[in-house]
Image (cartoon, helix red, strand yellow):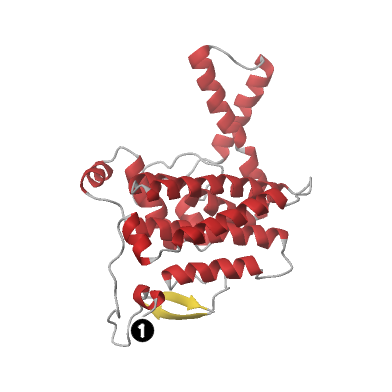
């Protein structure tokens, strides 16, 4: 008798061939036919996120904790929007939500691991406010008090100069100014999420921007539903782990972390990451370490 996990399993045999390879679902109906409990699994973890958001007590001096809860709230909305679009087979639209979620979680995990950069991230808010206030003035003529506006512009200019990034070594173009000189790809690699970069950032970016590739893909293809949901599900676990790691730091793997990972493996069978060392059972395949569970 073959279980759902067996049907989903695409592990390589000793001779390198794929055993029991199943076709990847491309529509919501195909996904539900394969994993009827998938919506329940995601709904359960969205409920857990909601409870954590409401019940977490953040100390007044805990700036990182405050950011974690704020990002969790925003990510909750991103995931809900992504699931809504996926449910209606609007898979390109779901990719837009995925990119927002990917960048948010990569940035948050980077700050969680390197809290010394938190003030740089917060200070860059001046640049965002400077852009918004300039737009408001250009459109409706309303501005801040002259002294406050001058101080904001000065601070924004200082931050832009400080964080001016070098040209990309691949495309030779000037990278846009950000709160850090570490670009998204480097940041993802540093926090162990670079395996999601293609599906979570590169492809959504080509679709969001007016590229010829993205336009043609929009007209002729349908971005795989399964890949989008796989990335989203992984990122959902990451933010739960960041939250528990910060607020329950004494216990390395909390029940919430372990159960969330087991639910993930129940759907996808394997993972391309150990989830920061939680998973220890794995094997090499094509130069990558693939993990199968506890």
Quarter of the picture containing the N terminus is bottom left
Of the pair 201 and 9, the residue shown nearer to us: 9
Q: Nearer the viewer, residue 96 or 49?
A: 49
Q: Quadrant of residue 146?
A: top right
Task: Tell me if 112 is positioned left or right of 39 in this view.
Answer: right
For the image shown, how many numbered marks are present on the structure? 1
Question: In percent of the image, x 30 and y 37: which residue is there?
Answer: 210
Displayed quadrant of residue 290: bottom left
Q: Position of residue 86 (x, y in %)?
A: 38, 50
Above or below, comparing residue 27 to residue 100 in the picture? below
Q: Is 145 positioned to the left or the right of 276 in the image?
A: right
Q: Secondary structure at mark 1?
A: loop
Residue at the far right: name it. Answer: 60
**Left or right placement of residue 268 versus residue 263 in this view:** left
Identify the residue at image location x=33%, y=81%: 12
Asked whether residue 268 is in view, the answer is yes
Rendering coords of residue 197 (x, y %): 42, 56
The location of residue 255, given as percent across then percent down, is 65, 69
Q: Residues within 10 Å of mark 1 (few under 14, many from 20)?
A: few
Instruction: List the single residue furthest toward the bottom.
Output: 14
User: Residue placed at 51% from the left, 50% from the top?
Assistant: 182
* Residue at 43% from the left image edge and 42% from the top image edge: 175
Q: Where's residue 257, x and y in %?
A: 61, 66
Q: Which residue is denoted by mark 1 in the rendering?
A: 1
Whether residue 169 can be seen here: no
Where is 208 relative to 241, above or below? above
């Amino acid at each position: 008798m073959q279980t759902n996990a067996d049907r989903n399993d695409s592990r390589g045999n000793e001779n390198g061939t794929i055993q029991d390879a199943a076709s990847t679902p491309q529509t919501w109906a195909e996904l539900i036919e394969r994993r009827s409990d998938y919506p329940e699994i995601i709904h359960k973890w969205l409920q857990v996120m909601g409870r954590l958001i409401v019940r977490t007590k953040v100390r007044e001096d805990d700036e990182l904790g405050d950011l974690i809860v704020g990002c969790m709230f925003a990510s909750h909305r991103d995931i809900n929007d992504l699931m809504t679009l996926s449910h209606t087979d609007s898979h390109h639209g779901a990719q837009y939500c995925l990119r927002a979620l990917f960048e948010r979680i990569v940035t948050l995990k980077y700050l969680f691991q390197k809290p010394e950069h938190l003030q740089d991230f917060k200070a860059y808010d001046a640049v965002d406010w400077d852009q918004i206030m300039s737009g408001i003035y250009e459109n409706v003529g309303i501005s801040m008090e002259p002294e406050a506006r001058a101080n904001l512009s000065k601070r924004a200019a200082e931050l832009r100069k400080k964080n001016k990034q070098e040209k990309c070594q691949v495309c030779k173009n000037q990278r846009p100014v950000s709160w850090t000189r570490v670009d998204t790809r480097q940041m993802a690699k540093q926090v162990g999420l670079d395996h999601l970069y293609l599906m979570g950032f590169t492809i959504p970016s080509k679709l969001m921007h007016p590229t010829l590739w993205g336009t043609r893909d929009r007209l002729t293809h349908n971005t795989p539903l399964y890949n989008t949901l796989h990335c989203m599900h992984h990122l959902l676990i990451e933010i739960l782990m960041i939250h528990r790691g910060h607020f329950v730091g004494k216990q390395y793997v909390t029940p919430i972390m372990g159960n969330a990972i087991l639910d993930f493996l129940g759907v996808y069978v394997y993972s391309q990451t150990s989830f920061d060392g939680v998973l220890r059972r794995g094997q090499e395949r094509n130069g990558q370490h693939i993990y199968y569970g506890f």
